[in-house]
Image (cartoon, grey):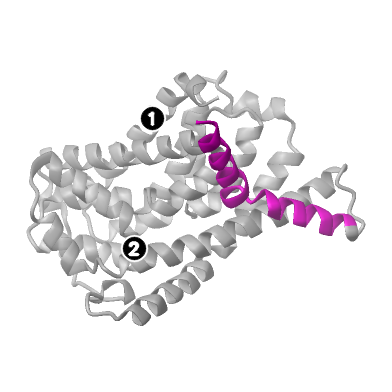
């Protein structure tokens, strides 16, 4: 048992946490004469280390996930989802959204394609909720910062939100709220079942470049905000606003997160800095979920394919679920200490 613990700690600290990278950055800054005992020095160290770590993990994870994704083109996904009914269908919709992450330009055509193919609306919404909210990359990246407990909690509650949200929408019988939109195509919607191994590798490399090009600005912005929170804002101020002692902390985190246009990779540094300042785990989960699932740009995009009534219901269900999750996990925060 002790050996397993040692091996896991090494994996957690050196592979996921990249403590070796932290030391490299620290030594490089010492060599350049940067004083790491000052706020400026600590901020520079945090910014360089966190940015490099996130971009390295992001590139590796997107490559691996995209390689797996090449085996799940839209037609195959439809076939898999069509085999299930009831709650099992919602579970499969949520799980497929998790293991087959699609870019924003292809998630909406897939959503329309699923409904046009006759799949129940609840399944498609379970997929639509889980796709941006939870993926294997989020799990690994969260483990690198917060450890397995919080990472697994995020994934589990994200899946539950997708499953329950899809089930509620299915029960409300809102199929007539889907707009008739001509299906469009993009790189994520082409069939990839006949790819050779080399073509799958090339596809994965291409997705790494596309994803990094899309998110690097948000990663840098998130790390920059994280550096400011980590080294410049007093802990008592953060705790007074977002600490578990403030009954409105979850609500505030959710409202603040919605206008931010980013994904888990862009918010992880902010969440890490808030965590070190004493912000509750539930508040952090609510913030990250609001950013990834309910950003204003994603709502605007969704408005093009669903009618206003369904849009309001969708936002209400997801936002309500996020807030409930936040308060529950704040109450159970002692389990993650």
Q: Mark yes or no: residue 254 visible.
A: no
Tell me: residue 274, above or below residue 174. Answer: above
How many neighbours does mark 1 have within 10 angstroms: few (below 14), some (14-19), or many (20 or more)? many
Q: Nearer the viewer, residue 337 or 237?
A: 337
Tell me: residue 192, above or below residue 79. Answer: below
Q: What element carries label 1?
A: helix
- Residue picked out by circle 2: 102
User: Is 3 in the magenta?
Assistant: yes
Q: Mark yes or no: residue 302 visible.
A: yes
Q: Which residue is drawn at 73% across and 36% down?
A: 233
Q: Where is residue 179 in the image (x, y as percent from the top left)?
A: 17, 60
Q: Which of marks 2 and 1 is nearer the N terminus?
A: 2
Stretch of the chain drawn in magenta: 1-30
Q: Residue at x 16, y 56 (%)?
A: 178
Tell me: residue 120, above or below residue 278. Answer: below
Q: Residue at x 69, y 55 (%)?
A: 21
User: Is 61 in the magenta?
Assistant: no
Whole-Å distance between the Cαs marked 2 and 1? Answer: 25 Å
34 lies left or right of 144: right
Q: What element carries label 2?
A: loop
44 lies left or right of 65: right
Main SS category, magenta section: helix
Tell me: residue 242, above or below residue 332. Answer: below
Q: In which quarter of the image is residue 173?
A: top left
Q: Which of 307 and 174 is in front in this view?
A: 174
Q: Where is residue 228 in the image (x, y as percent from the top left)?
A: 72, 45
- Residue picked out by circle 1: 325
How many neighbours does mark 2 have within 10 angstroms: few (below 14), some (14-19), or many (20 or more)? some
Q: Residue at x 24, y 66 (%)?
A: 72
């Amino acid at each position: 048992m002790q050996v397993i613990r040692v091996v896991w700690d090494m994996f957690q600290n050196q592979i996921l946490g990249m403590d070796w990278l932290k030391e490299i950055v620290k030594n490089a800054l010492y060599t350049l004469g940067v004083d790491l005992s000052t706020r400026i020095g600590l901020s520079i160290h945090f910014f360089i280390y966190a940015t490099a770590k996130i971009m390295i993990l992001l590139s590796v994870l997107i490559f691996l996930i995209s390689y797996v994704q090449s085996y799940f083109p839209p037609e195959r996904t439809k076939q898999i989802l069509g085999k299930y009914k009831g709650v099992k269908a919602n579970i499969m919709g949520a799980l497929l959204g998790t293991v087959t992450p699609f870019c924003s330009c292809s998630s909406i055509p897939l959503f329309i394609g699923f409904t046009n193919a006759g799949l129940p609306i609840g399944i498609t919404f379970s997929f639509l909720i889980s796709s941006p909210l939870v993926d294997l990359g989020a799990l690994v990246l969260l483990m690198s910062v917060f450890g397995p407990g919080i990472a697994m909690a995020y994934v589990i509650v994200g899946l539950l939100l997708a499953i329950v949200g899809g089930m509620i929408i299915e029960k409300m019988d809102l199929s007539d709220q889907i707009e008739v939109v001509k299906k469009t195509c993009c790189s994520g919607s082409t069939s990839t079942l006949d790819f050779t191994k080399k073509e799958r590798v090339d596809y994965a490399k291409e997705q790494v470049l596309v994803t990094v090009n899309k998110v690097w600005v948000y990663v840098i912005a998130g790390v920059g905000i994280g550096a400011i929170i980590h080294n410049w804002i007093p802990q008592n101020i953060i705790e007074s606003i977002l600490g578990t002692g403030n009954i409105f902390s979850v609500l505030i985190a959710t409202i603040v997160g919605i206008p931010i246009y980013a994904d888990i990779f862009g918010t992880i540094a902010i969440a890490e800095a808030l965590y070190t300042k004493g912000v509750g785990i539930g508040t952090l989960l609510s913030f990250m979920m609001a950013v990834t699932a309910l950003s204003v740009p994603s709502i605007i995009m969704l408005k093009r394919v669903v009618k206003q009534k369904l849009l309001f219901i969708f936002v209400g269900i997801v936002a309500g679920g996020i807030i409930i999750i936040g308060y529950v996990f704040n109450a159970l925060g002692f389990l993650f200490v």
